[in-house]
Image: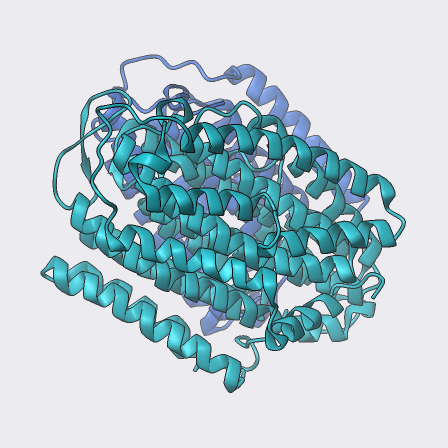
Amino acid sequence: MIFALVLIPLLAGLLAFVLPTPALRRGLLVGTALVHSALTAACWKWTPAPALGGWLGLDAAGLLFVSITSGLFLVVSFYVVGYLGQEANRHAEDFEEGFLFDNAPEAVFIGCLLLFLAAMTLVVVSQHFGLLWVGIEATTLASAPLIYFHRHHRSLEATWKYLLICSVGIALALLANFFLGVAATQTAGDGFPMVLSNLVAHARELQTPWLKAACLLFFVGYGTKMGLAPLHTWLPDAHSEAPSAVSALLSGAVLNCAFLGLIRVQQICVAAGLGDFGRSVWIALGLISVVVSAVFILGQTDYKRLLAYSSVENMGIIAVGIGLGGVGAFGAMLQAVNHSLAKAMLFLLSGNILTRYQSKSIARVRGLLTAAPATGLLWMAGFLAITGMPPFGLFLSKFTILKAAFDSNHLWIAVVLLAFLAVIFIGMTTAFLTMSQGEPEKTTSRIADRWWQILPPALLGLLVLWLGIFVPDTLSNVLHQIASTLGGAQ
Amino acid sequence: MLITNLILALVVLTNLKLLGSSRLGAMIRIVAAQGVALGILPIFAHWQEFSLHFALLALGTIIIKGIVFPWLLFRAIRDADFGRQIEPYVGYVASLVAGVLALGASFWVCSRLEMPGEIASPWMAPVAFFSIFAGLFLIVSRKRAASQVLGFLVLENGIYTFGIGVAVKTPFLVEIGVLLDVFVAVFVMGIAIFHINREFDHINTDRLSQLKD
C-alpha cells in the first residue's frame, strides 16, 4: 500500500510526458489525484504495514502530512484543469512590463506536478533519514519547472533562486545526515541503520556533540526549505512568480514536508535528552520568522508576496509551538493543518484576482466584492481565517499555542508573539480591505467566476471553518500522538 | 593509504585552482577531474571490503561526474558570450587567500574533533570541510550562473568525501538516491542556465535582481 502511494503518482508523472492529447493528460492528473487520496483515506482505516524493512512506514506524523498533501493535491488538481483550459497554448502578455511570453508545455507542467506529488509522498512515508533527504531534494527539483511555467525573466529569476538556495540548504542537510551517522557509529560498534524508530530507541547511546552539530545543520538545511527566517529568502519570489495553483501546493504542502523532516530530528533530540536544546532553536527561529514577516507584511504592495510572507509568519508560529512543547506542540500541529488549508485557499483565490485585474499590485485591485462577489466573499473569509479570527480553525490553534506560552511561564514569548501578530493583523487588514472595498474601475472585467475558480477554494474554506468549530476525535488523537513524541510539559 | 592521500591532495589542488580560475571551460574540466578522482576514492579508501556495491557506485559516480556533467554544462553555456570579462564579487587573488586560510582552519578544526573509530585517512575530514567551504565560497562570490552550479558540485563533492571517510555503512539505495538527485539537480540547473543565457544574452546572475521588497 505504501509502495502504491509513491509509485502511482511517479508512474503517472512519467506517463504524462508521453500522452498525446491535453484531455488525456488532464484526466490522468485528476484520476491520479483521486486514486491517491482514496488510498490515503484508506490508510486512516487500515494502518499500512511498513515496507522495505521498516524504511517506509506511516506513523502518526506521516499519516497526518500525507493526508494534507493528498487532499490539497486533489482540490488543486481540479483548479489546475480549469486553469490550463484557460491558459493553454497561447502567447500571453505580461501585465507588468507588457512583453509577450510563452507558457511551458502542458505535458511538462502536468508531468512535473505528478512527480512532485510522488516526491512529497516519499518524504512523508520515509522512516529512514537518507531516504527522507532524497525525497526532500526531489520535491525541490520536481517543483522548479512548475515555478517557471510562465516563461519570462522574473519567473526565471525566482526559479534560479529557489533551485540554488534550496539545493545548497538541502546539501547541508546531507552533511547533517552523515553527522548523525557519525553520532551513531561509535557506540553501537557497527552502527545501526538510520531508521527513526531505531535511532529513537538507541538515542541515549548517540554521541552528544555530533548529534548537536547534526541537529543545527538539519535546522539550516530543512529550515531553508520550510521557510524559517532568516533562511526564507527564496520563498516570496517563488510564491509570487509561480502560477497560483503551484503557490498553493508550495505553501500548503512543501513547507510541511520540510517541517516533517525537522519534526523527525526533534523526536531524536527528545529521546536523547536534548529536548531543551532542540526547543530553544525552534523558539529562536520561530520568533525571528514572525518578526521578519511582520516587517515585510506591513506596507507590502504585492498581494501574492503578502501571502508568501504570511506563510513565513505561520511557519514561525508553528516553530514557536513546537519549541514550547506539550500543549504547544499540539497547537503547532493543528496550526500546520489549518494553515495548509487556509493558505492554499487564499493562493487559489489570488489566481482568480490576478486573471481578473491583470495585476499583482494591491493598489490596482479595487472593489473585488462588487466585481466578483463570490471570489470577494471567499477572499474576505480567507482573510479572517488566516489572521486567526474565530470561528475559524486558526483561532483555535493560535490560541492553544499562546495559552501554552502563558501556562509554561514563557510570558515574554507570548508577549512578543502577540505584539507582532497585532502588527501583522494591521498590515493584512489594510491590504485585504483596500482590495475588497470601493468601486472597481470601468475596465475591470465583470464576467462571473467559473465553477473551478470558486468550488476548490470554497471547499478548503469550509474545512478550516469546520476545524474551528469541531476537531474530530480521530484527528485530535493523531495530533496528540505526534505532540507526545516532541517532549515538553504535557 | 598513500593513494588515498594522493587523491585527497588532488582534491585540495583542484579546489584552489577553481578559486583562482576565471575561465568557465577550464573550471568545468577541473570539476570533472575532481569528480573522477572522488569516484575512485572509495575503492582505495576501503579496499579491504571491496565489493560489487563499491564498484558499481564508483562507476556511476565517474560516469555522471566525469562525463555527463561536463557535457551538460558545456551544452548549457554553448552560446554564452565568453569574450566579455566578468569580474566576480570577490577577486581571484582574494579568493585564493581565503581558500588557503580555510584549508588551514579545516585542518585545525579537525585536529580537535573526536572522530569515530576507524577512518580511512586522517586527511579525509579536513579535505571534506575545505571542499564544502570552497563550494559555498564559489556560490556566493561568483556572478555567472554556471560558476554557481560548479560551486554546488564542489560543495556536494565535499559532503561526499566526508561520507566516504566516516559513514561507511550508508546503504546502497540511499547512495543511488543521492547520486540521482544530484544528477537531476545539475540537469535542471543546466536547463535554467540555458534559459538565463537566452533571456538575458549572458549568464550573469547579477541581472537576476528584479524581485525584491
> Is B15 left or right of A366, judged from the image as shown?
right
Query: At which x and y percent is residue A349?
Result: 37, 45
Looking at the picture, does residue B55 appear above or below residue B80?
below
- How many numbered badges does the structure rendering display? 0
Which quadrant does the C terminus of chain A fall into? bottom right
Please report the residue visible at 42 percent of the width from the left and 66 percent of the height from the top. A70
Chain A drawn in what color?
Answer: cyan
Q: Which chain corresponds to the colour blue?
A: B
Please report the residue visible at 70 percent of the width from the left and 41 percent of the height from the top. A285
Rendering quarter of residue A478? bottom right
> Is A229 left or right of B39, judged from the image as shown?
right
Please report the residue visible at 20 percent of the width from the left and 50 percent of the height from the top. A84
Please report the residue visible at 26 percent of the width from the left and 58 percent of the height from the top. A111
Looking at the picture, does residue A387 appear above or below residue A466?
above
> Is A122 left or right of A220, judged from the image as shown?
left
Can I make out residue A98 in this image? yes
Query: At which x and y percent is residue A469?
Result: 60, 63
Query: At which x and y percent is residue A242?
Result: 35, 40
Rendering quarter of residue A358? top left
Which quadrant does the N terminus of chain A fall into? bottom left
Query: At which x and y percent is residue A125?
Result: 51, 71
